[in-house]
Amino acid sequence: MNISIVIPLLNEEESIVELYNWIEKVMQSNGFLYEIIFIDDGSKDKSWKIIESLAEKHKHVRGIRFLENFGKSQALHAGFAETIGEVIITMDADLQDNPEEIPDLYRMIVKEDYDLVSGWKKKRYDAKLTKNLPSKLFNFAARRTSGLKLHDFNCGLKAYKSDVVKNIEVTGDMHRYIPVLAKNAGYSRIGEKVVQHQARKYGVTKFGMERFIRGFFDLITISFLSRFGKRPMHFFGTWGAIMLLVGFLFALYIGIDKLFINPSGRLITERPQFYIALTAMILGSQFFVAGFLGELVLRNKKESKNYIVKEQTNL
């Protein structure tokens, strides 16, 4: 199997058949052995019936249906688990990603030995105020935080070596940061390709402005996890030691002052330094406890799924 194409979708009944025919035309003209995995993320329209119909007619089409809308990250994670292709291609189902980019993406993985190639929608056909400008700010922040020099982290059109998708866990809303997850897992050959972006032909976007707010919160999370995800005690222990040192120094100061310098002065509990010392020591202890708990959780972590599959086709 040369290529596995993973397509998450939500309420895209108008575009599924047209997208399938487009992909099939490209795949057959290039002689690829391929499979297409549609992941229905809790659609309320006829999307699943269309996927079932395609799967009945074509053995290289498979489908996964979620019980409800769990999100794009969970859909990709479920699709990645089922892929058997040498190269994995992800794309959206709204016809804004061009399947004719797939052969070049495949060659970049196979011939140029990239671990991951991310699409760059250099010319976009989205609303400038609601999508383009926030996207530019988001990508700028992601570049500065992650160190990856990609222009479009959130482009749905990407290509991966098979072992990349099998060794990363895409949860929450982390689909925006798959290149960062891959980098953190040790895959350093991450490239980018300018891809053609299409204007939306059917329906409306399923993402609003709130996705950028969530995206920036996720960026903070993944930045922290990138540095301390495998060693939480390094972060919490450092801050715990600093707070304990501050508390100890204040306690030492007021103790020496009360015993040797000004024994007849105010009571220790009447001094603001006492409460600074007490607060710092409590916070320091809590930081240490948080670090130990983080280490314990990390060592006892078990793989779990945060989505529920309702039914599948050809799987």
Image (spheres, grey):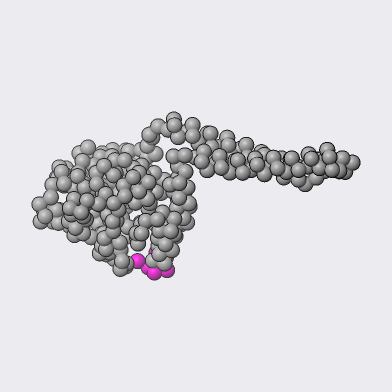
> Residue at image x 31%, y 66%?
122
Q: In which quarter of the image is residue 195?
A: bottom left
Viewer-closest of 123 and 50: 123
Q: Does the magenta stretch include residue 129?
A: yes
Viewer-closest of 7 and 152: 152
* 121 in relation to 46, above or below: below
Residue 19 appearing in the image:
no
Q: What stretch is highlighted in magenta?
A: 126-131
> Residue at image x 45%, y 53%?
219
Q: Residue 57 at x, y = what percent?
A: 14, 45
Q: Residue 97 at x, y = what percent?
A: 26, 59
Q: In which quarter of the image is the C terminus?
A: top left
Q: Quadrant of residue 247?
A: top right
Horizontal placement of 161 versus 146: left or right? left
> Residue at image x 37%, y 68%?
127
Horizontal placement of 286 versus 157: left or right? right
Horizontal placement of 177 versus 165: left or right? right
Q: Residue 260 at x, y = what percent?
A: 84, 40
Q: In which quarter of the image is the N terminus?
A: top left
Q: Residue 225 at x, y = what percent?
A: 45, 45
Viewer-closest of 267 and 222: 267
Q: Is residue 40 magenta?
A: no
Q: Residue furthest right?
A: 264
